[in-house]
């Protein structure tokens, strides 16, 4: 499998398991590449680690859910894998620039982080 195919398959895998407790090792195993080399290759091609990609996608989804539903911050924290509303609020604020309550109260826009689409073009 070429790197572009491996990264594409890894992204599909991560997206289909985004709400599960997946790790870099799970993703690398899925594409049949050593975790060490896959982590290096993914980071080099994409600009961030697999853990950062998963965290950013989850925060974007949490922000979207926060503004489109009445779910509580506690429910969002648990759903997106955080042990407490405080740790979720800290991560949410770091990603979006606002606390979840400020976003909900002021109808503040949240950041998006769309799934990766990798295109490689070689030119002479």
Image (cartoon, rainbow, N blue to C red):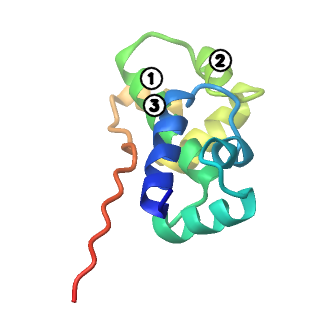
- Give the residue displayed 53% in from the left and 46% down from the top: 10
- Give the residue displayed 62% in from the left and 43% down from the top: 91
Q: Nearer the viewer, residue 72 or 78?
A: 78
**How many numbered marks have been drawn onto this rendered protein structure?**
3
Quadrant (top left/top right/bottom left/bottom right) for the C terminus: bottom left
How far apart, in angstroms, are the residues tagged by discs 2 and 3?
A: 15 Å
Task: Please indicate whether residue 121 sits to the left or right of residue 32 in the image.
Answer: left
Sequence order check: which comes first, mark 2 or mark 1?
A: 1
SS for dot 1: helix
Q: Which residue is mark 1?
A: 66
Q: Which residue is mark 3?
A: 61
Q: Position of residue 111 (x, y in %)?
A: 38, 44
Q: Residue furthest bottom?
A: 124
Q: Position of residue 82 (x, y in %)?
A: 71, 30
Q: Position of residue 7 (x, y in %)?
A: 49, 54
Q: Which residue is mark 2?
A: 74
> In the picture shown, does residue 93 fall above or below 35?
above
Determine the image quadrant of residue 26: top right
Q: Can you tell which mark lies on residue 106?
A: none
């Amino acid at each position: 499998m070429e790197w572009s195919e491996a990264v594409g398959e890894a992204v599909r895998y991560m997206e289909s398991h985004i709400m599960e407790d997946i790790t870099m090792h799970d993703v690398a195993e899925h594409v049949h590449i050593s975790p060490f080399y896959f982590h290096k290759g993914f980071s080099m091609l994409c600009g961030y680690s697999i853990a950062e990609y998963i965290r950013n996608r989850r925060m974007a989804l949490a922000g979207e859910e926060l503004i489109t539903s009445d779910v509580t911050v506690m429910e969002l924290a648990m759903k997106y894998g955080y042990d407490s509303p405080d740790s979720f609020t800290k991560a949410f604020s770091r990603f979006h620039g606002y606390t979840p309550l400020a976003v909900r109260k002021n109808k503040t826009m949240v950041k998006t982080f769309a799934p990766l689409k990798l295109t490689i073009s070689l030119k002479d």
